Amino acid sequence: MENPSAQKLIHKIQLDLFKKGFDVDILVADLKKLRDYSMEEQNPVLTKALRLTYEHLEQNGAFLIPIPDDEPVDEETELVAGEAAANENNLESLDYLLSLFTDLTKKNNLLDLKEYNKAFLAF
């Protein structure tokens, strides 16, 4: 995101996660504010990712999506990873997702964001 206020908000969210821990209510409120900035920037992939993220958090009370794989995996490995992800709050993945929001000019960041969107929809 290019907006300096949005960048500060992303940094605040990451800092809160590190210092205060995981709080769904605060996280969802901050992501909704961040989504307003993304709508101003007219980035549909980012806007969708933010909406899917906070909806996922509201529904599950945790972040249960793993970091997208660089390598294709076979179906059995994917099932095991999916089962593990369904059982624990994946803060490392959430932090990585937040870091993607900061610079979408990088092709890989945008591709990973699209993978997160697919994972949210498949969850």
Image (cartoon, helix red, strand yellow):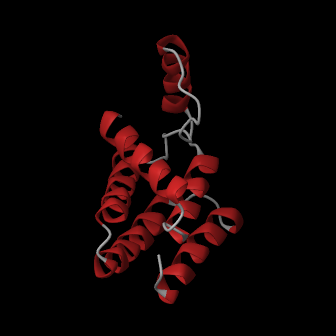
Left or right: 89 in relation to 118: right
Residue 32 % position (x, y): 35, 71
Residue 21 quadrant: bottom right
Name the residue nearer the viewer: 66 or 24: 66
The residue drawn where x is 43% and y is 43% is 115
Q: Residue furthest right?
A: 19
Q: Residue furthest bottom?
A: 4
> How many marks do you count on the picture?
0
Left or right: 22 in relation to 15: left
The residue drawn where x is 51% and y is 15% is 74
Residue 99 % position (x, y): 58, 63
Residue 123 % position (x, y): 35, 34
Name the residue nearer the viewer: 46 or 90: 46
The residue drawn where x is 41% and y is 64% is 28
The residue drawn where x is 55% and y is 24% is 81
Residue 83 % position (x, y): 50, 22
Residue 35 to residue 82: above or below: below
Residue 39 to residue 67: above or below: below
Residue 120 quadrant: top left
